[in-house]
Image: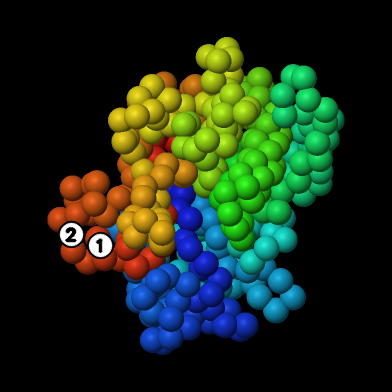
Amino acid sequence: MRIATWNVEWFTALFDDDNIPIEDDTPSARYEVTKRDQLVGIGIVLAAMDADAVLIVEAPDEGRRRSTVAALEGFAATCGLRTRKVLIGFPSHTEQEIALLYDPDVMMVAHDPRATVEAPRFDGRLEIALTEDSGPETALFSKPPLEVAVHPLVGAPFRLIGVHAKSKAPHGARGAVQVRRIGLENRRKQLAQCLWLRRRVEDHLRAGDRLVVLGDLNDGPGLDSFEGPFGRSGVEVVMGMGGPPALQLHDPHALAALRHPLSGGHSTARFYHAEERRYFPALLDYILVSPDLAAQAPRWHIWHPFDDPVCWSTPELRQALLDASDHFPVTLDFAP
């Protein structure tokens, strides 16, 4: 089985209020990329990945007039994708949803949110302390994680949690003082979300559930200075690093970043820095798996247009990845 996660930059901007793709030459949210070219690029990448299920981060908006399901299922039909059905959970408070695009001939899925005293439903709020010696803070998700019960038609069931954690970027800041203040505020919100998510992860692992946590965590070990005051990244929190091995999640890209923080390593996103006039890479997107799945020797793959030899040597796919998003997909192949 192959599952994937992909943050598609402002996917919602490619659809009108009738959930129809806008296939014209007007500008998309991608710099110097038309809506038509971004749509074509997304379709090419999804077809090339040929995954059984794809978590779409920044999926089209769900609202009074807009429908995530209608937009994505219509797009899948137009592209002839076998991942032609769509599942969403709690709607986002933004125009960016979390959705699962899946092949109904391979699996049955259901939105299955859980709640405990320690970890309530993700559409609520939670009072949580960021460190052992700090007071409680109110955590909430503007994009509630998508909790899915997956029942493959062949193989054992497993749990899937799709995530789009708070960005730490100090958007709108002016000057070094504002950059640091807003960056730290966003870091506190992102860490609180990861601590909440970690509580749910531990519930599943203690129950013996096969678990996959995937999506855009907007963080990585040693990614920036904002994790310094708190001693660890949000990714390390969700993975349970330093805790019992039976309660840890595994992702080789995250582990490599932890072991060799200065080596350059893997990246799943590419952003343009206007002041420096250059692109910089970041590892933000992950597929974290429970110990039982990790023991099966699954294969992870980042579909990077420059770092992956196949993507680089296939001009159509390479350009599609660059046109489609500022993030690149991650896939996981494993025995269901």
One can see residue 210 in this view: no
| Category of crowding for the residue at label 2, using alpha-carbon neighbours closer than 10 angstroms: few (below 14), some (14–19), many (at least 20) | few
Circles 1 and 2: CB distance less than 8 Å? yes
Q: Quadrant of the C terminus?
A: top left
Secondary structure of residue under mark 2 = loop
Q: Is residue 26 above or below residue 61?
A: below
Please name whichever residue, 32 or 8, is drawn nearer the observer in this view of the structure: 32
The residue at the far top in this view is 244
- In the image, residue 17 lies at what x, y percent? 62, 82
Residue 291 vs 253, above or below: the answer is: above
Point 45% across, 53% down: residue? 6
**Residue 4, percent from left and from top:** 43, 48
Residue at (34% x, 38% y) in the render: 266
Q: Is residue 173 visible?
A: yes
Query: Does 175 sit above or below residue 1?
Result: below
Residue at 76 percent across and 46 percent down: it is 140
Residue 250, horizontal then vertical, whole percent? 47, 27
The answer to which image quadrant residue 49 occupies is bottom left
Q: Which residue is mark 2?
A: 314
Q: Is residue 281 left or right of residue 66?
A: left
Q: Quadrant of the N terminus?
A: top left
Q: Nearer the viewer, residue 303 or 87?
A: 303
Q: Classify 322 as above or below 29.
A: above
Q: Which residue is mark 1?
A: 317
Residue pictured at 46% horizontal, 31% vertical? 222
Q: Quadrant of residue 26?
A: bottom left
Left of 222 or right of it: where is 98? right
Amino acid under disc 1 = Leu
